[in-house]
């Protein structure tokens, strides 16, 4: 993707070479922009109930790029901010899930999670083929919409060797459509006459981002919030096996250009390790609250940096087919999640 000025021939996340010859000090300006923008996004979301800071951040990043407000010297820092905080945020996310809490809800919750993830990924990939969306783009959308949004996109993009434009597009779509589900799920639940428990199950099994599930659960009440988050985190747990399967497939097909991806990326292993820690030992609620806030800030920082790699003209070029894929995937995941919620409730 071309940058607005001749001095930067590629997007900020593409322009920085992955080389240790670049002094760390050169990354400071771009990192400062990403961190400042994330703070603004979190502050804005705190003032507007239901507003996702991830959505605010990616919109802000897109605006900075397309209004020509970014200089070439920010490229390295923004490239770092697009990757490191995203992976760190996934690791910290592991502290939000206790396998004991999940087991206490019975077999129905993990069954819903596995069904939504497997069905959502397969159906979205198939729809992508029908719409002739590039395979890697369709797979990133499938994982983001079916598992846990931007974190899932990050969890599989390195495994499938996706390019930066595919990743940014998938993140933008998953944040946008997931945010649209925040008012849609309670509204449709009211129309369908669903009780609070069923609606919470539906939200946790269908809404894309953890933060978006929190927003829906908050509209339903504290009891519903806890249930919705637990169901959602059961889907998050599917990230590790999905990443492992995709990596194994990549190794078998030899489609990674000679590079053999790890069976499970290190940051996904970190996520699993913190899930195990949360399950095995009591962790003070204050620590969990701090971890949740840190996770949100890390992911928001990454979203802003990824947004700076988005060229509006590029999104328009991809346009209709990719938007149709995102809409279709949202409907499929929502339908499967609703069916599961009705069965379990």
Image (cartoon, rainbow, N blue to C red):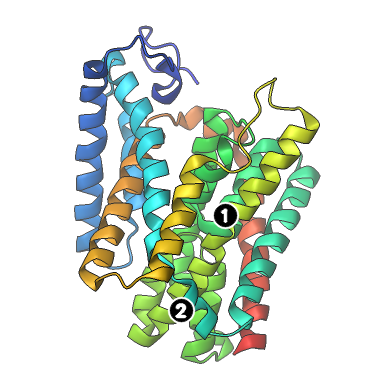
The residue under the point 42% across, 29% down is: 309
- Position of the C terminus, as image quadrant, is bottom right
Q: Image check: 288 left or right of 154?
A: left
Q: Position of residue 97 (x, y in %)?
A: 43, 67
Q: Nearer the viewer, residue 162 or 126?
A: 162
The residue under the point 74% across, 27% down is: 255
The residue under the point 63% across, 41% down is: 263
Q: Image check: 238 left or right of 45?
A: right
Q: Is residue 321 visible?
A: no
Q: Image check: 2 left or right of 202?
A: left
- Whole-number angstrom distance, CA of label 1 to CA of label 2: 18 Å
SS label for mark 1 = helix
Q: Image check: 270 left or right of 285?
A: right
SS label for mark 2 = helix
Q: Residues within 10 Å of mark 1 (few under 14, many from 20)?
A: many
In the rendered image, which residue does mark 2 sit on?
101
Q: Nearer the viewer, residue 144 or 20?
A: 20
């Amino acid at each position: 993707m071309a940058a607005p000025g001749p001095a930067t021939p590629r997007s900020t996340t593409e322009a920085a070479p992955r080389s240790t010859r670049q002094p760390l000090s050169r990354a400071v300006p771009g990192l400062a922009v990403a961190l400042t923008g994330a703070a603004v996004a979190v502050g804005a979301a705190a003032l507007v109930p239901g507003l996702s800071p991830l959505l605010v951040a990616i919109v802000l990043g897109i605006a900075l790029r397309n209004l020509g407000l970014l200089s070439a010297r920010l490229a390295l820092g923004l490239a770092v901010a697009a990757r490191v905080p995203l992976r760190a945020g996934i690791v910290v996310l592991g502290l939000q899930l206790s396998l004991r809490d999940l087991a206490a809800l019975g077999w129905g919750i993990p069954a819903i999670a596995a069904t939504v993830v497997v069905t959502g990924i397969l159906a979205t990939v198939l729809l992508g083929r029908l719409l002739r969306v590039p395979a890697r783009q369709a797979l990133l959308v499938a994982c983001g919409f079916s598992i846990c949004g931007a974190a899932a996109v990050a969890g599989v993009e390195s495994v499938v060797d996706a390019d930066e434009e595919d990743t940014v597009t998938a993140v933008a779509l998953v944040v946008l459509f997931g945010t649209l589900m925040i008012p849609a799920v309670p509204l449709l639940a009211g129309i369908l006459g669903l009780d609070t428990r069923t609606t919470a199950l539906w939200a946790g099994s269908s809404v894309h981002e953890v933060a978006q599930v929190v927003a829906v659960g908050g509209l339903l009440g504290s009891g519903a919030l806890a249930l919705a988050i637990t169901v959602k985190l059961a889907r998050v747990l599917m990230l590790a096996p999905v990443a492992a399967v995709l990596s194994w497939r990549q190794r078998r097909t030899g489609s990674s250009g000679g590079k053999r991806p790890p069976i499970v990326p290190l940051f996904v292993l970190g996520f699993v390790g913190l899930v195990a820690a949360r399950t095995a030992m009591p962790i003070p609620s204050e620590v969990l609250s701090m971890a949740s806030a840190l996770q949100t800030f890390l992911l928001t920082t990454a979203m802003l940096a990824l947004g700076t790699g988005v060229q509006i003209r590029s999104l328009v070029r991809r346009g209709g087919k990719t938007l149709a894929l995102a809409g279709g995937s949202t409907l499929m995941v929502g339908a499967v999640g609703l069916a599961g919620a009705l069965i379990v409730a």
